[in-house]
Image (cartoon, grey):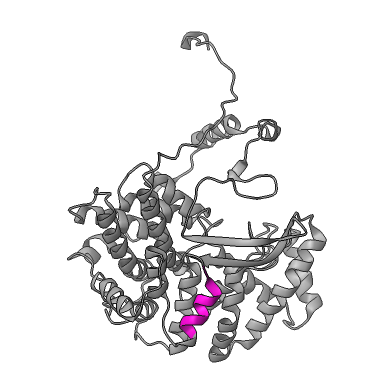
Amino acid sequence: MEHNTYSDITPEILRLAKLSEEAGIIDSELFTKYEVKRGLRDLNGKGVLAGLTHISDVRAKEIVNGEEVPAHGRLFYRGYDVQDLVDGFTNENRFGFEEIAYLLLFSKLPNKQELAEFQALLGGYRSLPTSFVRDIIMKAPSRDMMNTLARSVLTLYSYDDRADDTSIPNVLRQCLQLISLFPMLSIYGYQAYSHYHDGNSLFIHKPIAELSTAENILHILRPDSAYTPLEARILDIALVLHMEHGGGNNSSFTTHVVTSSLTDTYSTIAAAIGSLKGPRHGGANIKVVQMFEDMKQEVKDWEDEEEVSAYLQKLLHKEAFDHAGLIYGVGHAIYSKSDPRAVSFKTFVEKLSVEKGLQKEFALYSMVERLAPQIIASERQMYKGVSINVDFYSGFVYHMLGLPMELYPPIFAIARIVGWSAHRLEELANNGKIIRPAYKPIGEDKSYISIKYR
């Protein structure tokens, strides 16, 4: 590829960047002095109350003898324990994505007829505008699928005759269309990049309206469109577990903030995509897989606890993998004893590892799940406990499904668009004020000096 000088970091940019960085640094003691909740969190990591929501709830503590103590995490969608929801549709051998999307959007579980009508509605929306794939997705394919997804979403604005209508019926229509189109936008974007940049064959499979979202993802992505029932079921569960996670997560909060300005749905969802793209939010499972690939190279005996523990200690000491001092997939801002999504996922992950003949890899993951919290607790002062999070196993699942790493964050977005839609509709329904937090100015007043005296 021809080198693009437009992207060069020149010496002049480096000089100006140093000035910018120096101008931006704020004495950390001032945050304490003025009681600033950095990241909208207090010193114990608890989120500042910024709003109310019916949509979901994250619980990681319980009251014992009048005091809050850490507890095993629980996640609720519209008042229903997610574990109960997953058990419900899996025990009845149903796909859950569409059913739980209905719950999050409309605050009730659908009956058979309502679910069938909703599935048909989503299936009918799985159709991109004429020539959209050729004229938009195939042009200037990006190596980052989240940027490709955001660009496609923003471009859909131009095809919508009621793009700026923020009435609830119109926004619901837009959200349902985006929920249906996200798999196509994401996977077609990847296929274009894979073809033009990596020289792979180009496959553009049309979705099948009668298939579930999980089945369509595998059908569209794979050259032969083949998949096993277990593969589709586990991907469906992954989508349900990633669909929503409390109103305080970064991308859902972004959705509320941008919606409060009364901008259009496409701009709002593109902003949420930009938030989810960040490695601190939606890109963590890539790091987990890369970390384990490095671990499998460095650790000679995967069953040797001492050798695995030594590698984990090297990670914390910035002596292994990316030298960041982190064990990826371990720890969460809210959960301390357990992440309910990881607990719910693990049994299905083990089943898939058996189907794929990767039991040794699963055993290694299970060992790290057990050892990592102990090692972190012994090495670092913790204000709360630490456990694995959903990213720990989701990356392994996507790896076993043969999904390219470029699609890991978009798969997250394909699920989370449901939660974003619910939050956008909730913000609009409450007709609140524009969200405008305060930043305290701490600079000194200065007198203007003519340029000839500077």
Q: In the picture shown, does residue 175 fall above or below 368?
A: above
The reply to whether residue 319 is visible in this rendering is no
Instruction: Say whether residue 452 is magenta.
Output: no
Could you tell me which quadrant the N terminus lies in?
A: bottom left
Image coordinates for residue 188, horizontal then vertical, percent: 32, 69
Q: In the picture shown, does residue 191 fall above or below 59?
A: below
For the image, the number of numbered tags is 0
Type of secondary structure dominating the magenta stretch = helix
**Toward the viewer: 332 or 447?**
332
- The extreme front residue here reads 65
The reply to whether residue 54 is visible in this rendering is yes
Query: Magenta region: which residues?
Result: 80-90
Q: In the picture shown, does residue 422 fall above or below 8?
A: below
Image coordinates for residue 352, horizontal then vertical, percent: 54, 86
**Toward the viewer: 90 or 439?**
90
Quarter-of-image position of residue 260: top left
Instruction: Say whether residue 85 is magenta.
Output: yes
Image coordinates for residue 4, horizontal then vertical, percent: 39, 50
Residue at (21% x, 53% y) in the render: 158
Q: In the picture shown, does residue 304 fall above or below 290?
A: below
In the image, taking residue 110 as reference, residue 208 lies left or right, namely left
**Toward the viewer: 133 or 437?**
437
